[in-house]
Image (cartoon, rainbow, N blue to C red):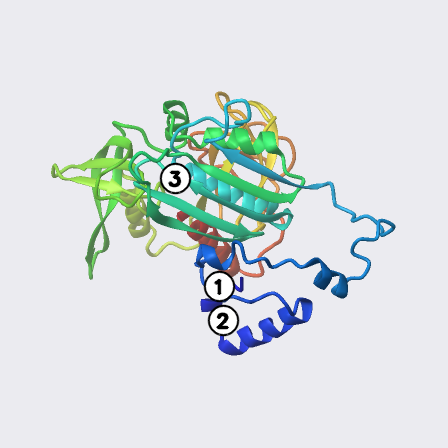
Amino acid sequence: LLNKTDLVTEADLARIEARLRGINAFAPIRRCSRGDVSVDSVLNIHGFDLQRALQTNPQLLNPENAPTQHDKTVTSVSLDQGAPRHMRTVQKGDLDFELATDFLEYIAESQGEDIYRMKGVLAVAHSQQKYIYHAVHMTFSGGFEEAWQPGEPRESKMVFIGKGLDEQFLASTFNNCLATPENLTRKASTLRFKPGDAVECRTTGFDAEEGERWAAGTVVEVLHRADDMAPGEVAPYRVRLEDGSELTVLTDEGSEIVGANSHGDEEDGEEAGEGCEAQAAPQQQQQFRVQVPDGVHAGQAFPATVGGGHLIFQITVPPGHGPGSWLTVTAPVEATGGARAGGGAEGSGAAAAGNSAEGTHARTTHQAASEGEADHEADEASKRHKA
């Protein structure tokens, strides 16, 4: 099967088919896209002929041939909610979409070179469609596709093929992605605001003279879900504005929601600073979400790399968190110093992590050539998180 033919030119297909015939001149070649082929074209085709195989390889049946050598570090791990109970390593239930995609992103980024392939079908909370994904190393493709049929068990299946796979870690992290009350409570604890907090939100309106419009309000709900939202999507906040209307805030980022008076203070500060010399520009902050590895508990530190490998944190796990917990870390985009910050983590460039972790610091392992490059790295990290 010559798959993904929709992604290349006719000249590329002819060249690849010529190489395939050089490997096996007898096998028929069927072009397809997204693996769409009829069952009759692949089953009961009687494609193997021993005499023909011996013509190609006369030593095929020779027991004196050197045995095939396999790399024992290359294994496969299957996480199947539909497996028999005595063979099932994961719990049943729908997955939280953000936690699950963060998990897959973490695996692709941290172990991508050793992950030869991973694929799966996920049952996601708040979705009537299956989330189907496939990845080779760090190249990932996924989306909501066919619907769950009436009576069909909503069961997730993940398959990993690669080198040095830790089945226990993969299974425990999968369980931490389930949309259970415990996992969602832990997820909510990483948000910057809680119900009842006074905030300011960026609204959709824009004024040519005033620029972006912000409105004051109060958080009335965290992890908000509405029927008109995309499959699996859960918003960090539902905010009731001072005029009585409600606003759904889709990201927990400073560009969309800040603490009460924070936006106004920034504007006042700009006005107060007019005409003053040597005003220090505010240090731009960027939020990152990282997961505590297996075996690391409260009070212990672990390294976490984000932003395309340019930012590395030494994070101390706060009380109440442990293996599988997702932590939100706030650090300067252009963090270059070696100062310690928060939490008592050892070593330079340490960062404390917790519900908010405001004001923590990190350091770059590879110094950006310019401020623009550092900003670009932060933007790329933010885009990956949103995706």
The mark nearer the N terminus, 3 or 1, is 1
SS at badge 2: loop
Residue 8: assigned label: 2
Q: CA distance from mark 3 to mark 1?
A: 27 Å
Q: Is residue 24 left or right of residue 68?
A: left
Q: Tell me residue 106's x, y (percent).
A: 53, 42
The answer to which quarter of the image holds residue 225 is: top left
Q: Is residue 73 visible?
A: yes
Q: Looking at the picture, tell me which residue is in the foreground, 296 or 89.
A: 89
Measured along the vertical axis of the image, is residue 365 above or below residue 303? below
Q: Looking at the picture, tell me which residue is in the foreground, 16 or 113.
A: 16
Q: Residues within 10 Å of mark 3 (few under 14, many from 20)?
A: many
Q: Tell me residue 378's x, y (percent).
A: 47, 52
Q: Tell me residue 174's x, y (percent).
A: 49, 33
Residue 4: assigned label: 1
Q: Is residue 139 left or right of residue 131?
A: right
SS at badge 1: loop
At label 3, the amino acid type is: Phe
Q: CA distance from mark 1 to mark 2?
A: 8 Å
Task: Look at discs 2 and 3 and give the one toward the viewer.
Answer: 2
The answer to which quarter of the image holds residue 358 is: top left
Q: Tell me residue 11's x, y (percent).
A: 53, 78
Question: Could you tell me which residue is drawn at 66 percent across and 66 percent down?
Answer: 24
